Amino acid sequence: MSYNRTQIVRARSEHLDILKTWFPDRERAYEWCGPGLRFPFTHETFVEDIHWQGMPSYSLLSENEELIGFGQYYEKAGRCHLARLVISQSYRFRGFGYRFIYRLMEIGMEDLGVNACSLFVIRSNAKALKCYRALKFEKTDYPPGHSYYNDIDFMVRKNKKREITDSGKAKK
């Protein structure tokens, strides 16, 4: 399946039931959401911990409405801060994450009226780090007043218009 056959939509509550199954253990839940997700979680704690009611949430769906990815954003320190980004295991390493995050950045920056993005990432999550670096995110100091975690990096990307090829890679 190609990315061109997918759609990005506002996440719906039925997507949460699928999303929860992607985190069957504490390690994967922490890698995705950091210390903010209680585990084991119930439906109620999951919805509360991901700030479902108060944060724009988007899903990447296949042409058959299969959930491929999920992500959220909000304003932090004058940037579009991306949160809880994930791509289904069966769709990884095919450019879906890169293209989904790039589009979510565009949506969030336009919505918030900002021109830069940020995110937190668990330092041991090599796959996510590779994707974020390909998107030109760079590690920087934590924003003022934010709690520090020694296993989590804060990354920032300033908006630069770039074309994306059909393979999901940025043109140089």
Image (spheres, helix red, strand yellow):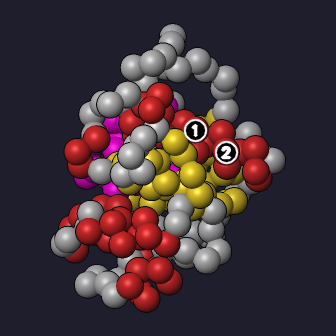
Q: Looking at this view, is 50 or 134 the one in front?
A: 50
Residue that carries the numbered disc 1 in the rendered image: 103
For residue 109, above or below residue 50: above
Residue 108 image position (x, y, % from top left): 67, 49
Mark 1 residue element: helix
Residue numbers of the magenta segment? 119-135
- Tell me which residue sits at (52%, 20%) in the image: 164
- Tell me which residue sits at (75%, 44%) in the image: 110
Q: Quadrant of the N terminus?
A: top left
80 part of magenta stretch: no
Question: Distance between the Cα atoms at labels 1 and 2?
Answer: 6 Å
| Contact flag, marks 1 and 2 (Cβ < 8 Å) | yes
Residue that carries the numbered disc 2 in the rendered image: 107
- Tell me which residue sits at (35%, 42%) in the image: 129
Residue 57 image position (x, y, % from top left): 57, 61
Q: Looking at this view, is 95 or 160 the one in front?
A: 95
